[in-house]
Image (cartoon, rainbow, N blue to C red):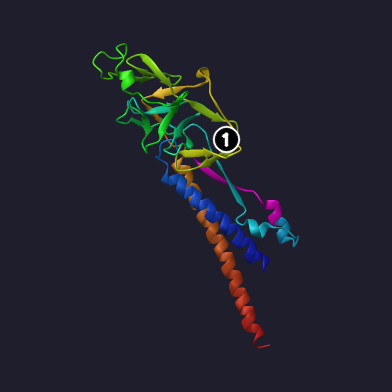
Amino acid sequence: MIKEIYTAALGMQSQITRLETTANNIANAQTTGYKRMSIFERDLILAQDNLNNIEGDVEQDDPATGSYFDFSQGVMQITDNPLDLAIEGKGFFTLMDVDGKEYLTRGGSFRISEDGTILSMDGKKLKGSEGPISINREFFSRHSITADNTARSIRIGIAGEVFVNDSEVARISVVEPKDLNTLQRASASLFTLSEEAEKEELEMNKVTIRQGWLEGSNVNIVKEMVQMIELQRMYDAGSKVIQTNDNTIEKSIMTGRFV
């Protein structure tokens, strides 16, 4: 293989991955709780060895890139909706689907089902310290909470306490993985933990939850657009290198036919 073509093609594959990632970041710039994804080169030494004709496995690992997430705080947006929650600082909400699988998220848009269960917008249950949180008929029927069998107010404390008419009924579980690199993206704002990963529930004094707020995406759309333009230019440059070398080879072949 001609090294110039191989080098250009390898670079173009990385640029394609970067372009796809940047486009996804831009598409989710308004997604609640979305965390920006970035790409880095992970096989540069192997690539150099390959170009020097040293036996290696870089070709099986193309494209030579890896990914990571930027878990910095997103923009805090006030909504005044009592079921909109935002975590300030470290931690994730824990959600559970119908099969019992757990997900971690910074997206705090919730609703209450007909049976009193607090759900995410896609129907997953919000977990508390003692399991999924359900503000059910048992709580509503307590005279200390309401005298007319109707919930008058739901308040979320700064440490995740859930109050119904000022009576505490549950506490939201806020967890933190011991290694953020073990998180795997399941959807735009949902993450799962790898099998070997560990997490811990944060103590009340380490949790800050803002009721009536949402954490927006941490994507800077201007920077992403600038990066996309730069990546497109680099991709075009690689394409021209391949085209130039291809034309040179074609001319050499045509010349050789008449020698």
* Residue at left offset 71%, top offset 56%: 48
Magenta-tinted stretch: 35-47
In the structure shown, which secondary structural element does the residue marked by tag 1 occupy?
helix
* Residue at left offset 40%, top offset 27%: 85
**Residue bearing the label numbered 1:** 180
Where residue 167 sits: x, y (%)? 36, 14
| Residue 37 magenta-highlighted | yes
Q: Report crowding for label 1: few under 14, some 14 to 19, many 20 or more residues within 10 A (C-alpha).
A: some
| Residue 256 magenta-highlighted | no
Where residue 172 sits: x, y (%)? 44, 24
The image quadrant of residue 2 is: bottom right
Where residue 55 sits: x, y (%)? 75, 60
Residue type, mark 1 in image: Leu
- Work out whether 210 lies above or below 30: above
- Work out whether 4 lies above or below 210: below
Where residue 65 sits: x, y (%)? 60, 51
Report the quarter where the C terminus lies. Answer: bottom right
Left or right for 175, reference 30: right
Residue, far top: 144
